[in-house]
Image: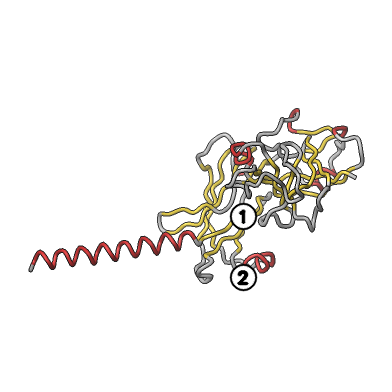
Amino acid sequence: MKRNLLLITKTLVFTAAASISFAFTGWAANIQGELTNVGSSTISGWAWNKEDTNDVQKVEVHICRADDPNPVKYLHVEADDYRDDLVSKLNDGWHGFSVSVDWSQLKGNDFKVKAYAVKGDKYYTLGSTINYSKAAKSPAQAASSTDNSTVHFVEPVGQPASSKGTVQASAYSGNERSLGLFQVSGYCNCSQCSSGFGLTYSGTVPKANHTIAADLTVLPIGTRIRIGNTIYTVEDTGSSIIGNRLDIYYADHASAENHGLQQMEVFLLQ
């Protein structure tokens, strides 16, 4: 009798533990979000549990130097701010977050920023890493600079680096105008990044250092733009490429992944 009771007790405990484990796994899988901007004074993004919109996400932002994976600064915030852009994306605007950052307190010039939703001792990555440089100038700052011969920008990982982090004004001989800073990521033709069919939305075969995906309501198919020293043609799009977002095509997944999510100045070729 005692043996039967012990077996029953063990079975009940195992069943309860398994139920909790399965419920937690499914619940964690529903947490989504991303960093959307790393600026000179604030870092912002969004996070939510799509199965429980009343579950406010606690967000932890990690700031690392570009050459060191260990964070030099941790920032904590709750994702309960209202953002208009989330209404169209999530049908619920109350899942944004924004936290202040004082870059002058951090030694170094170039950083990588990551965000996580935190549940107990579990961390869930929110989107991609964003690179930030203290030296990067906004289009307005660049226009007001006394040196109009160069435009400063964040060099894309995996692309040929230009001299001293600048691109000469003569890099493109035609007319062009700045479209401002865009969030730029990388992708390849693998099943993890895209459909894997081998063709772009426009039906072309994607090529590295040429193909870029954009929101076609912002930059239509065939639009030519310059980022750094490379001229790209809009040939593709994607469900997450909305507004001032771009996705550069790379020949392999490692290069695409290493690109991360960067703020880069984009120039429209005219």
Which image quarter is the C terminus in? top right
Amino acid on which disc 1 is placed: Ser
Describe residue 208's horizontal placement relative to residue 148 as left or right: left
Q: Nearer the viewer, residue 225 or 75?
A: 225
How many numbered badges does the structure rendering display? 2
The residue sitting at 80% across, 53% down in the picture is: 219
In the picture, the disc for residue 116 is none
**Residue 59, image x, y percentages:** 52, 57
Residue assigned mark 1: 100
Q: In which quarter of the image is residue 155?
A: top right
**Residue 181, image x, y percentages:** 75, 48
- In the image, farthest residue toward the top: 163
Mark 2 burial class by Cα count in 10 Å: few <14, some 14-19, many 20+: some
Mark 1 → mark 2, Cα distance in angstroms = 24 Å
The residue sitting at 57% across, 34% down in the picture is: 67
The residue sitting at 63% across, 56% down in the picture is: 44
Amino acid on which disc 2 is placed: Asp
**Residue 84, image x, y percentages:** 69, 67
- In the image, farthest residue toward the left: 1
Between disc 1 and disc 2, the foreground one is 2
Task: Reply above or below: 160 against 222.
Answer: above
Residue assigned mark 2: 92
Q: Quadrant of residue 149?
A: top right
Q: Nearer the viewer, residue 239 or 42?
A: 239
Q: Which numbered disc flags the more N-terminal residue, 1 or 2? A: 2
